[in-house]
Image (spheres, helix red, strand yellow):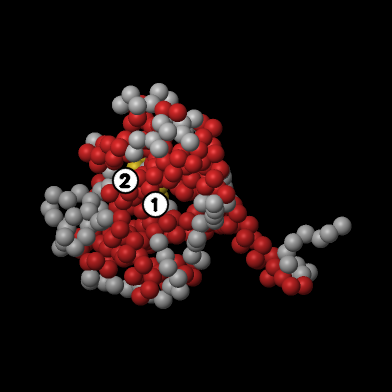
């Protein structure tokens, strides 16, 4: 068996030097313990003797056991990080996971709300209660401008230009983009800003704050949206990502401008945005099935004909 004391040292390194959350560290430990069990079965007794071939076999075994591609990606990430530490400490000379990629999984289409569901979610009247007014402004802005959850809670007062109708967003990779804000979102923001001073501390620069007057947390946003969807009769669970996905889908359906949607979402590669073209096709296929007099097949099959 490889020396598991290195895993414990690695965990202390993650806690003290990298200051990773306990949940993240726990995931790393589980992945590395799975690796040690594999090494025991393979007869590999030392960390320095693990090879790229072994890592590929480890990933393959996980795939055969039914592990998802995302789980295998996480395992590889844990191994790469662990070996980076071992190399630094002189316990290994190379990283055997450096060039190993996880198998590709099925690409899941994002969940979206249709325009009627969005209207039910966002059109409620909660005038006067600062927290409810804040929620309306926040979720209207996410949908209006296609913001990520992290981007929305990171916004400061200075990031919104209501006169120009734009918001400045710091996205992934510290890349800044400026995106339009719709009229309804601007109206909601104006209402929120007229009440924000009741709960925000004077030095707080965050656009959206919680009851304590400090910047709103991502978890609080998720909980508030879930509660709002239940209160307004949206018949399913809703998360902030669904608002961003709905923004992209509705915009693409109306405009067909894939590159423009890419820019608005802040995607570095248009291939990331292309997932929404699949959603658009689903919409078109639904319309076709409803409207074309000879579209439907027996049993509802839309498959091709055999020849």
Q: Mark 2 points at which residue?
A: 25
Kindly tell me whether residue 101 is visible in this rendering: no
Which quarter of the image is occupied by the C terminus? bottom right
Residue 239: give x, y in percent of width and height: 40, 61
- Location of residue 35 (image quadrant): top left
Q: In this view, does 259 lie above or below 237?
A: above
At a point 49% along the width and 41% down the height, the residue shown is: 41
At a point 62% along the width and 60% down the height, the residue shown is: 282
Q: In this view, does 141 lie above or below 234?
A: above
Dot 1 alpha-carbon crowd within 10 angstroms: few under 14, some 14 to 19, many 20 or more: many
Dot 2 alpha-carbon crowd within 10 angstroms: few under 14, some 14 to 19, many 20 or more: some
- Location of residue 28 (image quadrant): top left
Residue 300: give x, y in percent of width and height: 72, 70
Which quarter of the image is occupied by the N terminus? top left
Looking at the picture, tell me which residue is in the foreground, 248 or 296. Answer: 296
In this image, 180 relative to 292: left or right? Answer: left
Looking at the picture, tell me which residue is in the foreground, 220 or 46. Answer: 46
Kindly tell me whether residue 139 is visible in this rendering: yes
Looking at the picture, tell me which residue is in the foreground, 90 or 76. Answer: 90
Looking at the rendered structure, which numbered label has been put on residue 36? none
Work out how far the residue at label 2 is from the one at label 1, CA to CA, in angstroms.
29 Å
In this image, 235 relative to 190: left or right? Answer: right
At a point 27% along the width and 63% down the height, the residue shown is: 134
Decide which of tag 2 and tag 1 comes sooner along the chain: 2
Residue 175: give x, y in percent of width and height: 38, 38
Q: Considering the numbered disc 2 on the image, is that residue within a helix, a strand or a loop?
A: helix
At a point 36% along the width and 67% down the height, the residue shown is: 226
Closer to the observer: label 2 or label 1? 2
Q: Name the residue under label 1.
A: 147
For this orientation, the residue located farthest to the left is 202
Q: Considering the numbered disc 1 on the image, is that residue within a helix, a strand or a loop?
A: loop
Residue 275: give x, y in percent of width and height: 56, 50
């Amino acid at each position: 068996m490889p020396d598991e004391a290195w895993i414990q040292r690695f965990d202390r390194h993650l806690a003290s030097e990298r200051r990773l959350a306990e949940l993240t560290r726990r995931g790393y430990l589980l992945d590395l313990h799975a690796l040690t069990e594999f090494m025991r079965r393979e007869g590999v007794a030392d960390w320095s003797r693990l090879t790229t071939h072994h890592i590929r076999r480890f990933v393959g075994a996980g795939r055969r056991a039914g592990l998802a591609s995302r789980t295998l990606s996480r395992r590889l990430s844990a191994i790469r990080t662990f070996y980076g530490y071992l190399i630094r400490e002189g316990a290994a000379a190379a990283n055997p996971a450096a060039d190993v990629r996880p198998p590709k999984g099925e690409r899941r289409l994002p969940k979206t709300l249709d325009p009627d569901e969005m209207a039910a979610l966002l059109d409620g009247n909660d005038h006067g209660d600062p927290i409810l007014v804040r929620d309306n402004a926040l979720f209207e802005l996410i949908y209006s401008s296609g913001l990520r959850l992290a981007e929305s809670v990171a916004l400061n007062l200075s990031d919104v230009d209501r006169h120009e109708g734009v918001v400045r967003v710091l996205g992934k990779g510290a890349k800044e983009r400026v995106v339009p804000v719709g009229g309804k979102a601007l109206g909601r923001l104006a209402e929120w800003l007229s009440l924000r001073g009741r709960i925000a501390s004077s030095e707080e620069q965050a656009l959206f704050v919680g009851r304590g007057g400090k910047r709103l947390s991502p978890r609080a946003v998720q909980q508030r949206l879930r509660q709002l969807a239940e209160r307004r009769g949206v018949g399913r669970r809703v998360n902030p990502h669904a608002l961003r996905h709905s923004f992209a889908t509705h915009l693409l359906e109306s405009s067909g401008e894939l590159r423009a949607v890419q820019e608005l979402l802040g995607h570095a590669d248009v291939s990331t945005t292309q997932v929404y073209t699949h959603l658009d096709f689903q919409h078109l296929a639904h319309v076709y099935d409803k409207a074309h007099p000879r579209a439907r097949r027996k049993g509802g099959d839309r498959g091709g004909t055999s020849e």
